[in-house]
Each structure stands twice: as structure tokens, then as C-alpha cells.
Image: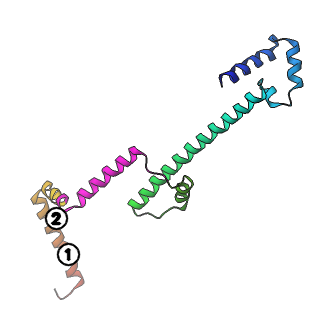
Amino acid sequence: MAFFMKTMISNQVKNLGFGGGSEEKKEEGGASDPAAAHGMTREEYEEYQKQMIEEKMERDAAFTQKKAERACLRVHLREKYRLPKSEMDENQIQMAGDDVDLPEDLRKMVDEDQEEEEDKDSILGQFQNLQNMDLDTIKEKAQATFTEIKQTAEQKCSVM
């Protein structure tokens, strides 16, 4: 890669008129060959092309993996909140080879949220919430609910 950059810079300097005149004529004659146009031998040019293709494939694979991870997160959130599934997300996960998990940071966050929800849903979690509430507040809520139910029943039933 460094050779390529060095060659490109030297070609630009030659094009400014600092190079020899005979070299410019050679380059004009070999312009049909892409390797000569870039100032490289055919082998160097082929190696460069192969390297560029490999780098592009690596970037594409990383991009596809990231898209699949995001789709996996969306699928997880849809399951958690009971939202409808998306075929687009399922397709992205399949394109990545079904070997996709949530990124580690997100997995930790999801696990922490799940643990908190499980704690709140458990009987002990409910007792802790009751302990945090004031007994007077609980009595007021119960009395208000009872009064509301009684009023609703009186409105619906003329016998009472």
C-alpha cells in the first residue's frame, strides 16, 4: 500500500512537469493497461486489486454482522414487550448466518433489566414494595377503592 501511494505521488509530480519528457511518452502509450496507468507492474497491480477486494469483503462482513446484531436486539425487544415480529429483522439475522448474539454490553444491560423485573414480579419484591409504602397510604387507597365500588354499585343497582 505504501508503494502504491509513493508511486501515485511520483506520478503526480511527473505530471506537473518535473519529470523527464521520455517517461511521459511511455505512460501515454501504456494507458490502456491499468497497471501501467497506476505506475505498477502487472503483478503489483493484481496484488493491489486482490487486497482491495479482501478489505471490501471484510468491511461488508463486519457491516452485515452489525446489522444482524441490531436486528437481534430489535427482535429481543419485540419479544420482551410483546410487539409484532418483523420479517426484515429475521432476514437480516439469517443473512448473517444465524450465529448472531447481542453485543456483550447490551446483553449485560438486558440481563440486569430482566433481573430487576423478576425481582419486582416475585412475592418478595411485592412485600418490599409494601414495606416501602406507608400503612396510612394503603388504608386510604383501600378505603377510596371500597367507596368507589360502593358508589358504582349504588348507581347500577336501584335496590341498594
- Identify residue type, mark 1: Ile
Task: Based on the picture, tell me whether residue 107 belongs to the magenta stretch.
Answer: yes
For residue 3, the mark is: none
- Considering every residue shown, the one lying at the far front of the view is 43
- Tell me the residue at 43%/63% (across/down): 83
Q: Label 2: state its secondary structure.
A: helix
Which residue is painted at 88% across and 23% down in the image? 28
Q: How far across and how far down the image is residue 143, in percent?
A: 13, 68
Lower position in the chain sequence, tag 2 or tag 1: 2
Q: Residue 50: horizontal and vertical position, in percent?
A: 69, 36
According to the picture, the residue beneath numbered tag 1 turns out to be 149
Q: Observer-nearest residue: 3 or 154?
A: 3
**Residue 87 belongs to the span the image colors magenta:** no
Q: Nearer the viewer, residue 68 or 138?
A: 68
Residue stretch in magenta: 99-125
Specify the quadrant that holds the C terminus: bottom left
Q: Residue 131: horizontal and vertical position, in percent?
A: 12, 56
Per the rendering, the mark at residue 141 is: 2
